[in-house]
Image (tube, helix red, strand yellow):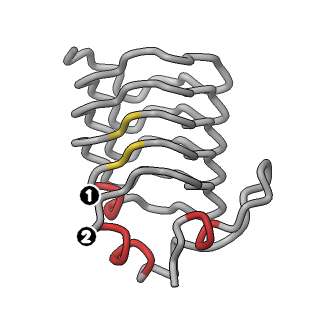
Amino acid sequence: ANIDITGQDFSNAKYKGKDFTQVIAKGTSFVNSNLQGCRFYKAYLVNTDFTGADLRGAALEDTSMDGAILKDTIAAGAYFGQSLLDVQTVENADFTDAQIPVKTLPLLCEREDIVKGTNPVTGVDTRDSLMCP
């Protein structure tokens, strides 16, 4: 807890099931990494790059995600808090069966600038995976 990994590169690696609780990861790169089932509870993920990461079943509740990049991620079954609204983009992300706060989801669906595209791996449409109207 409270480990500072700011600006470090954790790209193209496997961290399946690791606990990143309360980690400080400002500007950290997890590009194309396997983060299945990882716990990021109360983590500081400002400007963190998750492009192409596998976040299936990951826990991202009570995080600070201002400017985080979730482009091309597979976030099926992941758990998010309201900070999902603060991300830079969720373009091409797959949120199938993800747990998103009831009041957060409609606000996220309104952001057509970031909620668009189709996941390059799963072929799932981002808006459909969020069940946006």
**85 displayed left or right of 70:** left
Query: Looking at the rendering, in which quadrant would you find the N terminus?
Result: top left
Asked if the residue under mark 1 is in contact with the one under mark 2, i.e. CB atoms within 8 Å, the reply is yes
Q: Residue at x 55, y 55 (%)?
A: 95
| 124 displayed left or right of 29 | right
- Within-10-Å neighbours for mark 1: few <14, some 14–19, many 20+: many
21 left or right of 12? left
Q: Which residue is mark 1?
A: 82
Secondary element under disc 1, as helix, strand or loop, is: helix
C-alpha distance separating marks 2 and 1: 8 Å
Residue 92 sits above or below residue 20 on the image:
below
Amino acid, disc 1: Gln
Amino acid tagged 2: Lys
Q: Nearer the viewer, mark 2 or mark 1?
A: 2
Q: Nearer the viewer, residue 5 or 109?
A: 109
Residue drawn at x 25%, y 45% as measured from the top left:
64
Residue 62's spot in the image, x, y percent? 22, 42
Residue at 33%, 76% (x, y): give it.
107
* Whole-percent x, y for residue 111 in the image: 44, 79
Q: Is residue 24 above or below residue 62?
A: above
The quadrant where residue 123 appears: bottom right
Residue 31: assigned label: none
Count neighbours of disc 2 (C-alpha within 10 A) and say few if under 14, some if 14 to 19, many if 20 or more.
Answer: few
Find disc 2 in the rendering and name its residue: 103
**109 to 74, vertically: above or below:** below
